Amino acid sequence: MTAVPVSMPGSFGRLRLIIAALTVLAAASLLLAWTLATSDRPTTAVVWGNLALAALAFGLLCIRAGTAGRTSWALLRTHLVAGKQAGLVPTILEVRDMYLDLLRSSLTRYGEDELAPIRASNHPMVRRVFGILAKRNIRLVRAIPFDEQKRNLGLDWPASAETMIGMQRLTHLQHCVETVLAEDIPGDLIECGVWRGGACILMRAVLAAYGDEERCVWLADSFEGVPPPDPENYSADKDLRLDLAADVLAIPESTVRNNFKRYGLLDDRVRFLPGWFKDTLPDAPIDRIALLRLDGDLYESTVQALDALYPRLSAEGFCIIDDYHPIDACRQAVTDYRQRNSISAEVIDIDGTGVYWRKSVREVNTRP
Ligand SMILES: C[S@@+](CC[C@H](N)C(=O)[O-])C[C@H]1O[C@@H](n2cnc3c(N)ncnc32)[C@H](O)[C@@H]1O
């Protein structure tokens, strides 16, 4: 851990010069005013006299401000040094960890009861009442008490959190990005299936917190939810009707952008790939990838993303599969892809739901 650098601001030398110049000006003006006053030009003497007084007053103010600034900086420095010795002032690295911890808590709404909107039933009377309330900006909500286990393991669809992957997978994601930076693994970071964007917000925040100025975070999503199953081409998906949950899973791109803005993290290194994976990923303008995170749930979505992007993953890069354990179709897609491409790197469990592996150097070297 390094200490907060303590240095003096560099403006005091310049201040002394200004004060000296003002003093000379004031003295010269006074002399001139006195000479003119004793001659036949008393009006000009008054102008020079006033100028001299103004210069003197300004000089005195500068001296006072300089002394005050110096005093408060010295005081702050004394406090910082004393506090550091007493273990009271966090180092900049501790502050960075605190920022990322706080961000993960916020993105998962950790520890908070949530308010979920109550949807109107199809009864015309109920719809009418809901319509009248909506016009007055009144919404009916149901309180959902915080469930620590569910939020740790990402086992629910949160009402307002920006990510559904839970604290453990989010923390693991942070460590992966930190490893990418520490080991300088080349390439950008991408998530396929972003929902409200929380996992990508964290990835952008880690880059910012570590001062990375090169890498982009890519967000690939239909922003319309999961596609309907295509059993002719992907039989494993035939019973997966996540497309019917569009009211929860379809999050517009504008909402995701706003979520980034809320955390002050939307810039030109956050890149959007809107559309179905099969259309957007094969020609996505990304050369190299250091971290590939797949969260599209279906066989179709998982295999399309692997086909298009895995070849661009750098050696030692991370391939993270969010729904490997709970969704059979997703796991099948991964198993088939790995077999077809002779990938033998160990699949490592994260939290009983997600898994990851790191692309081996041998894999990269044996590719044609
Ligand atoms: C489970 S959510 C992702 C959760 C998100 N990673 C998080 O941090 O909370 C699945 C997302 O994948 C998207 N999706 C699934 N299959 C897709 C496909 N084939 N093309 C485009 N988007 C897809 C959906 O729109 C949805 O936003």
Image (tube, helix red, strand yellow):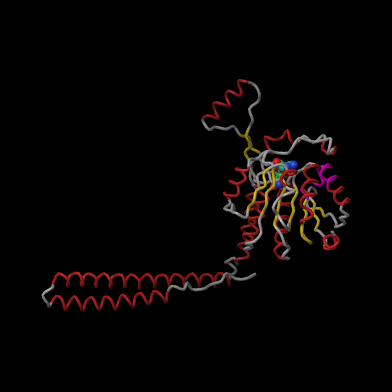
Residue 148 visible, this orientation: no
In which quarter of the view is residue 50 placed?
bottom left
The magenta stretch spans which residues? Answer: 321-333
Identify the residue at image location x=83%, y=35%: 231
Q: Between residues 16 and 359, which one lies in front from this camera angle?
A: 359
Ligand 1 shows up in the quarter that is top right
Q: Quadrant of the C terminus?
A: bottom right
When the figure is inspected, residue 97 is found, relative to residue 329, above or below; the finding is: below
Q: Position of residue 154 (x, y in %)?
A: 73, 46
Would you say residue 330 sits in the magenta stretch?
A: yes
89 w.r.t. 321: above or below: below
Q: Position of residue 12 (x, y in %)?
A: 42, 74
Percent from the top left, x then y, of residue 141?
61, 34
Examine the structure image and report whether residue 69 is included in the region drawn in magenta: no
Residue 174: percent from left, percent from top: 70, 57
Q: Would residue 296 be seen by someone viewing this image from the given angle?
A: yes
Which image quarter: residue 131? Answer: top right
Image quarter (top left, top right, bottom left or bottom right) of the N terminus: bottom right
Which residue is painted at 79% across and 35% down in the image? 229
Total labels drawn: 0
